[in-house]
Image (tube, helix red, strand yellow):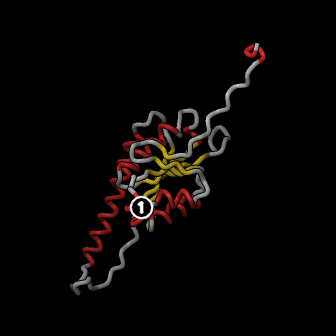
Amino acid sequence: MDAGGGKTRRIVVAVDESKESMEALSWCLSHLINPENADSIVLVLLYVKPPPPIYSYFDAAEFLFSGDIVVAMEKYGNDLVQSVMERAEAVYGNFITRINVEKVVERGDPKDVICHTVKKLNADKLVMGSHGYGFMMRALLGSVSKHCAKNVKCPVVIVNHHGDPIMTPLPPPPPPPSSSLEAA
C-alpha cells in the first residue's frame, strides 16, 4: 500500500543490453508514470542472464577447460548486468519525479523467466522492447515479446524499435448525440 492508502502497482520493465529495452523504459516513464501516481508505483527492472553453459573438463578439441575461463565468463556476465543497470539508472535518473525502483536479476531463458517473474511479483503491467526483427529472424529466434504477450496475465506493452508502443488501437468514440435544436 502506498502512503495514501491506495494499492501499490508494480510495473515490470524487461531490460537488456539493447537500446530497444532502454527506449521501452523511457516510454514507460513518460507514459505510465506521472507525479500524481509515482508514489503508488514500484518500477521493477528485470534483467535475465542467459543460462549457464554446461562445462565439461574438456572442450570440443579435448583441451582442458580451465576454471579461470569459467570465472572470467561469470565475471563478464556480472559486469554486463552492472552495465545494463547503470544505463537504466541513467534513464530513470533523468525522470522528473522520484520513483520506487527494484532491480531483479534472474537466470534462464528470457521468455520463460520474464513470464515467471511477472507472475511471481503479481505485476500489474509488463513493458518490454521489441527488436523489430523481420519474419525470418522471428522464425529462427522466436519472439520473446510475443511469447510474453500470450502467456502473462497482466497487460503487456511492447514498445517497438522506434519508441512507439505496439497496442491494439481503440475504436473511435461514438459521435455525440444530435440535439433537437440542430435538427430544426
Q: Secondary structure at mark 1?
A: helix
Q: Residue at x 44, y 68 (%)?
A: 108
Residue picked out by circle 1: 138
Q: Quadrant of the C terminus?
A: top right
Residue 75: x and y in percent read 30, 65
- In-front residue for pair 172/95: 172
Q: Residue furthest bottom?
A: 62
Q: Residue furthest right?
A: 180
Above or below 130: residue 58: below
In percent of width and height, residue 117 lies at: 53, 61
Quarter of the figure with residue 26: top left
**Pick the front one: 135 or 99:** 135
Q: In the rendered view, does 128 fall on the left or right side of 66?
A: right
Residue under the image location 53 percent in, 46 percent down: 167
**Residue at 26% from the left image edge and 82% from the top image edge:** 59
In-front residue for pair 6/110: 110
Could you tell me which residue is drawn at 67 percent across and 41 percent down?
6
Front residue (pair 151, 17): 151
Few, some or many C-alpha atoms within 10 Å of disc 1 (few <14, some 14-19, many ≥20)?
A: some
- The quarter of the rendered structure image containing the N terminus is top right
Tell me the amino acid under the disc marked 1.
Arg
* Residue 63 percent location from the top left of the image: 21, 85
The number of discs equals: 1
Q: From the viewer's perspective, is residue 10 above or below residue 76?
A: above
| Image-quadrant location for residue 96 | top left
119 over 4 or under it: above or below:
below
Q: State the image coordinates of residue 156 (x, y, percent, origin top left).
A: 55, 51
